[in-house]
Amino acid sequence: MSAAEAGGVFHRARGRTLDAFSAEKEREWKGPFYFIQGTDPQFGLMKAWSIGDCDNSGDEWGQEVRLTEQAVQAVNKLNPKPRFFVLCGDLIHAMPGMPWRKEQTADLQRVLRDVDSEIPLVLVSGNHDVGNVPTPETVAEFQQTWGDDYFSFWVGGVLFLVLNSQFLYNCSGCPALKQAQDAWLDQQLRLAEQHRCRHAVVFQHIPLFLQSIDEDDNYFNLTRAIRRELADKFARAARESPKRAHQGRGYGPRGRTVTAETEKDGQMAPSEQWEVPVPEDGGQQGILPTRCHVICR
């Protein structure tokens, strides 16, 4: 199912925004709300992982289908409804050009059709969606299938930014696309400052870091140079705030609280647990699931 064919099912990001929300109506702070964040449905991974062949296998994904169906049912039962449901990448397991990619995509789209129509989907690209080394062709395929790979939208006075983190991991196959995203992100952070938004929240597949901003480079984080560059960029955008949050790490009971490392007076240190609902006064707390960063004022 292409983006055009599924137009009545999903609100695809187009023109670097998500038309499920009106920017004019949503820029104003209107009190607390919440959203649901998930990641890596990755149809095809579980069998491949179990047999130790994650690079070439992935010909079965019935277990992933059942788990994703359960997640959709749980989200649909929530009352009040979340403002949106974001999936932070690795939507399927088959890399671009690999067998089973079309079939995994079709099955995931079939399952996601059952998400309540009043809960918009926000879809983030991961390495299995655009490739470990993305190219203009793999990015175009993602856009055709799922929508824009980076975009922004407003909800309840909060500016949400979605990034293609593969550009930050290895852009050797598409340097011009990475430059375009960099310029766009700078423009969006200026917009956040101009509108004095209470919070700006960033979604991406690869987190800046897992434990500490100075940790060693590995497969699951961005390089030190890139994470410092991004952290400094986010900190500058939040320079009037005494707390500058970079990455959520860990969940409390039923996912309702998270802990975060914050920057204060130039030092990184663990912060207190932050409640998931955004507070009524728009204070310094925010939503900080893994692979999500919040810029607070």
Image (spheres, grey):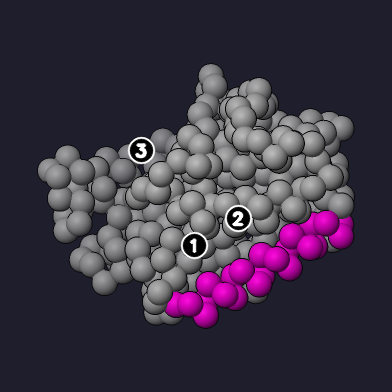
Task: Say which residue appears at 45% left-offset and 54% top-offset.
Answer: 223
Horizontal side of 29 relative to 222 (left or right) equals right
Give the magenta range.
174-195
Q: Is residue 42 magenta?
A: no
Q: How many marks?
A: 3
User: Does 121 sit left or right of 279 as displayed?
Assistant: left
- Which mark is on residue 20? none
Given this view, does label 1 or label 3 mark the residue nearer the observer?
1
Residue hosting label 1: 168
Which residue is labeled 3 in the image? Answer: 67
Please identify the quarter of the rendering in which residue 80 is found: top right
Identity, as a three-letter code, of the amino acid under mark 3: Leu
Dot placed on the residue nearer the N-terminal end, 1 or 3: 3
Residue 258: x and y in percent read: 58, 28
Query: Residue 230, which numbered label?
Result: 2
Left or right of 4? Residue 120 is right
Name the element at disc 1. Answer: helix
The residue drawn where x is 74% and y is 60% is 189
Q: Indicate which disc, 2 or 1, sits on the residue closer to the N terminus.
A: 1
Give the mark, 3 or 2, whose residue is nearer the N terminus: 3
Report if residue 183 lies within the magenta region. yes
